[in-house]
Amino acid sequence: MTGKLYIVGVGPGHHDHMTFRAKEVIAESDTIVGYETYVNLVQDLIGGKTVYRYAMTQEVERAHQCIDLAKSGKIVSLVSSGDPGIYGMAGLIYETLAETGWDPKDGLQVEIIPGVSALNSCASIIGSPLMTDFAVVSMSDLLVPWEIIEKRVEAAAQGDFVIVIYNPASKKRIHQLQDTRKVLLKYRKPTTPVAIIKGAFRDSETIVMTDLENLPNHSDQLGMITTVIIGNSSTYTYKDLMINPRGYKSKYNLEEQTNPNLKV
């Protein structure tokens, strides 16, 4: 019997935002593996299947078990919130397989099922903050030294990128977002719009619209399921929405355009 390993992005946490393919491969699988919080997101889709739940920080054990189960003939879905290729398990699975000399052409079948990442889901909730170039930075320094993360933040700030921040804070991660804010204030106005989205599309969803100056006042909203979006020099807010101009205003003179038949 030939097994297979699916690395599945289940989206932000609401079934309406899971892809058809994600639901399809979960249904096809006889075994489900994942961090407990992510497994719970698909609880009603995995009845009758063998389920392995893991705590946070057990990523390596998860990867090895998924591979071993699939090699034994199981159809395995390793579930991940958002997209598994963005700060997810896809990298670790491929690293682990590569160390064994795995050949994707005739070795274990592996398929990544892309999902809706936090940057997509959070941006859709608060408006259109990612209409121009943006950078994505994780504040987690467990795998990347803080000195390197700080350099990336500085480069993104100098480049006037909209910045999406994953993992902004945890019980042990206190100074990182504070230091990031200090760097950004060297290049951006204190009034630069900031959105804090916690638990996007989950029952616990909360949204705070603020700015760089007042960001420290909302530390209670920060955590592992929080995403912070910080605007650039062009970003503005309108009725609790964050908008980043795409450039059409200057190109098509939208303020004065009255011809409804114009094709943009």
Image (cartoon, rainbow, N blue to C red):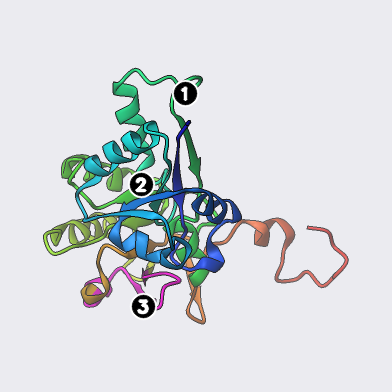
Which of disc 3 and disc 2 is earlier in sequence?
2
Secondary structure, mark 2, is loop
Q: Amino acid at mark 3?
A: Ser
* C-alpha span from label 2 to label 3: 22 Å
Q: Which mark is residue 66?
A: none
Q: Is residue 205 magenta?
A: yes
* Residue occupying the point 23% across, 40% down: 60
User: Residue 30 or 11: which is nearer the viewer?
Assistant: 30
Tell me: residue 259, above or below residue 33: below
Give the crowd class for mark 1: few <14, some 14-19, many >=20 residues within 10 Å: few
Residue 73 place in picture, x, y as percent: 42, 35
Q: Which mark is residue 204?
A: 3
Q: Which mark is residue 88?
A: 2
* C-alpha span from label 3 to label 1: 40 Å
Secondary structure, mark 3, is loop
User: Residue 168 or 114: which is nearer the viewer?
Assistant: 114
User: Residue 185 or 18: which is nearer the viewer?
Assistant: 18
Image: magenta residue range: 196-218
Which quarter of the rendering shows the C terminus? bottom right
Which of disc 1 and disc 3 is earlier in sequence?
1
Q: Amino acid at mark 2?
A: Gly
Q: Amino acid at mark 1?
A: Pro
Q: Which residue is denoted by mark 1 in the rendering?
A: 104
